[in-house]
Image (cartoon, rainbow, N blue to C red):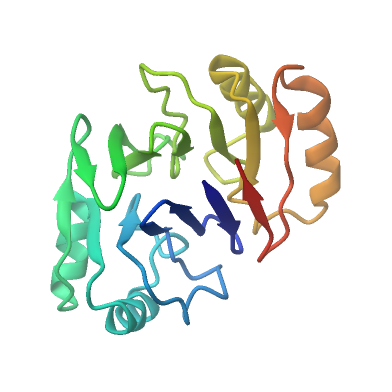
């Protein structure tokens, strides 16, 4: 498995014949020219996770790619003329490899902010991208896309999330809002489990497992 991190929460997962792009959003760059994709997965409808117009460009460059998203996002995309297959927690997708769907709801930002759907994707039974959630699957997670900073998040919750999963590797994502990333990364590295390697990837960097 090869993971390429783009800015914020956008990740390319390559495993065997599968090339899966996750959350091509407005804070991310570099994914627009990708070709050979087998699937595009969207965790939820917020613009930092799905940039509608650039998603359209990606799909035009990858006509064979299937597009999966939570039901709320699928509805939003349909209004823009983009057809996506809505998915629900408990489903298993086959897109060149297996993708198991978990989650269901976005993390709470504030009680006055309506909660929207959010799904988490477990790729090949190994890499978990939780979107904007602290989803804990009922299976072991080897590699975690670790939400690092958000309006719905605080450092203690991130640490407890990693402790709950204890993956072999945690790769920080959802990090575009960080003013001093190294401060957060040092804190997470110190307080997350010794069994978990914190692997920080700059935009465009890859990790192979």
Where in the figure is residue 28, as x and y percent of width and height? 55, 68
Please give left or right for residue 152 compared with residue 54 in the image.
right
Q: Quadrant of residue 137?
A: top left
Question: Quick check: 124 above or below 140?
Answer: below
Hey, which residue is sitting farthest front in the picture?
Answer: 16
* Residue 148 appears in the figure: no
- Residue at image x 54%, y 28%? 142
Residue 42: x and y, percent? 33, 55
For residue 181, above or below residue 100? below
- Locate residue 112: give its quadrant: top left
Query: Where is residue 154 drawn, in percent x and y?
Result: 64, 33
Residue at figure coordinates x 14%, y 73% from the top left: 79
Tell me what residue is drawn at x 17 percent, y 62 percent: 84
Q: Nearer the viewer, residue 208 or 103?
A: 208
> Horizontally, is 176 left or right of 16 in the view?
right
Q: In which quarter of the image is the C terminus?
A: top right
Residue drawn at x 79%, y 40% is: 185
| Picture coordinates of residue 108, whole percent (x, y) | 42, 35
In the rendered structure, the answer to whether residue 3 lies left or right of residue 33 reads right
Question: Is 177 drawn above or below residue 130 in the view shown?
Answer: below
């Amino acid at each position: 498995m090869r993971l390429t991190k783009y800015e914020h929460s956008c990740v390319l997962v390559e495993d065997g014949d599968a090339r899966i792009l996750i959350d091509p959003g407005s804070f991310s760059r570099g994914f627009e020219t990708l070709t050979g994709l087998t699937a595009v997965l969207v965790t939820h409808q917020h613009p930092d996770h799905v940039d509608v117009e650039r998603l359209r460009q990606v799909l035009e460059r990858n006509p064979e790619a299937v597009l999966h998203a939570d039901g709320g996002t699928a509805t939003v995309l349909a209004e823009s003329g983009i057809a996506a297959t809505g998915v629900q927690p408990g489903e298993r997708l086959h897109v060149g490899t297996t993708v198991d769907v978990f989650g269901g709801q976005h993390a709470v930002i504030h009680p006055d902010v309506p909660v929207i759907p959010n799904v988490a994707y477990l790729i090949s039974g190994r890499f978990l991208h939780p979107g904007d959630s602290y989803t804990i699957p009922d299976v072991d997670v080897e590699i975690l896309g670790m939400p690092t900073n958000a309006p719905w998040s605080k450092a203690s919750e991130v640490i407890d999330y990693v402790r709950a999963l204890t993956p072999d590797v945690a790769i920080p994502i959802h990090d575009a809002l960080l003013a001093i990333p190294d401060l957060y990364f040092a804190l997470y590295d110190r307080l997350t489990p010794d069994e978990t390697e914190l692997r920080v990837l700059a935009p465009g960097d890859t990790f192979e497992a």
